[in-house]
Image (tube, helix red, strand yellow):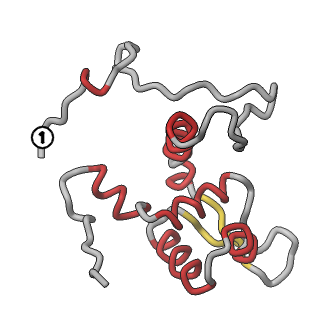
Amino acid sequence: MVKRVSLWNAGCPVARSLDAIGDWWSLLIIRDAFDGKRRFGEFQSGLGISKGVLSTRLRDLTKRGIFETVPASDGTAYREYILTEKGRGLFPVIVALRQWGEDHLFADGEARSSLVDREGHAPVARLEVRSADGRSLHWSDTEVVGS
């Protein structure tokens, strides 16, 4: 098995982000947290992930400040994992992955979950990249500068 190389000191924000949350289990755990899961057992049963892998991912995500643990909301001795402000900042990432998957990974008419606004139950609008002055930007309208 190839040893994973850390990208934490890379000059690219995408590389550093992938170092923090780039494996699929981490992103699925974060997705489930947005869907209201908070306990180890909820994550494990929902994802079908092994206890060891889940424990490692939750420990790493907590160490990186994406989750924090708090006493269980029902007063039991359990701990719950809640997204921090840093973790909640990943919401647009999860929405972007969802929308990309809807566009490219499902056949027409194939059943899938959908993200809706709680208030009116209308589908969430498409994410869009905009310039500082509000113009809609396509990938070819941007460039990376600096390191």
Q: Could you say where residue 104 lies in the image, as x and y percent from the top left?
A: 50, 38
* Image quadrant assignment for residue 132: top left
- The residue sitting at 26% across, 71% down in the picture is 6
Between 45 and 39, the one nearer to me in the picture: 45
Q: Could you say where residue 54 lies in the image, as x and y percent from the top left?
A: 58, 78
The residue beneath circle 1 is 146
Q: In the figure, 119 relative to 97: above or below?
A: above
Q: Could you say where residue 43 lies in the image, as x and y percent from the top left?
A: 69, 70
Task: Describe residue 96's horizontal placement relative to residue 32 as left or right.
Answer: left
User: Quadrant location of the N terminus?
Assistant: bottom left
- Is disc 1 placed on a helix, strand or loop? loop
Task: Describe residue 8's horizontal placement relative to residue 108 as left or right.
Answer: left
Between 11 and 106, the one nearer to me in the picture: 106
- The residue sitting at 59% across, 68% down in the picture is 68
Task: Describe residue 15's horizontal placement relative to residue 31 as left or right.
Answer: left
Q: In the figure, 107 relative to 51: above or below?
A: above
Between 11 and 116, the one nearer to me in the picture: 116
Q: Which amino acid is tagged 1? A: Gly
